[in-house]
Image (spheres, rainbow, N blue to C red):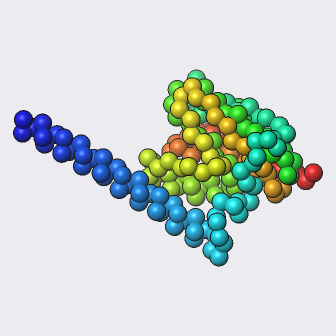
Amino acid sequence: MKVDHFMKFNQTETVLMKTAYTTAAILLLSAGLAAAAPGHSGGHHDMAVGEPGDAAKATRTINVTMFESDDGKMLFQPNAFEVKKGQTIRFSILNKGEIDHEFVLDEKEKNAEHRELMMKFPEMEHDDPNAIRLEAGKRGNIVWTFSNTGTFEFACLIPGHYESGMHGAVEVSAK
Ligand SMILES: [Cu+2]
């Protein structure tokens, strides 16, 4: 009985520690975002890559699959898109792989910062409109309006995945 109680206590401790850990990660991320955009209000609305789109206004669907290849790579297919400024795209994303993957749309530099943060806090999960994390076999959507021209990036920021090939480019051209 004593052993049982001890184990239960230990499990509770672990859960509490995890919660504290996640909270710390979220706080750090918030601090990071705030620092990255000094003087701005409402960080997400100021993203250079664009803003969450209205599904009713989507003019095009892009199907993306995420998977691990037989030779040890992790990939998006296709791994490059061209869109027009102002266009609202529905990304229909399928995780055909055997492990979790995510699709994060952002500036290349922002993804790099985010990736570093995820290396420090591997259990960190984001709940941002420009990102979706999918378990193996799952499908999900992101509706996005590209409001600026330029070259942006979509990537999987789970530690090790970017390095294994999980990133691609979105080229946004003028109308
Ligand atoms: Cu991945």
Query: Where the N terminus falls, by quadrant?
Result: top left
Quadrant in which residue 58 is drawn:
top right
Q: Position of residue 104 (x, y in %)?
A: 63, 46
Left or right relative to 31: residue 44: right
Quadrant in which residue 2 is drawn:
top left
Q: Residue furthest top?
A: 70
Q: How many marks?
A: 0
Q: Residue at x 72, y 43 (%)?
A: 143
Q: Residue furthest right?
A: 175
Q: Position of residue 24 (x, y in %)?
A: 41, 60
Q: Position of residue 92 (x, y in %)?
A: 70, 34
Q: Residue at x 76, y 42 (%)?
A: 55
Quadrant in which residue 74 is drawn:
top right
Compared to 171, does 41 lie above or below?
below
Q: Residue furthest bottom?
A: 39
- Can residue 113 be spotted in the picture? yes
Q: Residue at x 44, y 52 (%)?
A: 121
- Can residue 75 be spotted in the picture? no
Compared to 111, does 100 lie above or below?
above
Q: Residue furthest left?
A: 2
Q: Position of residue 105 (x, y in %)?
A: 68, 48
The one of 24 and 154 positioned closer to us in this rendering: 24
Q: Residue at x 64, y 64 (%)?
A: 43
The one of 40 and 106 positioned closer to us in this rendering: 40
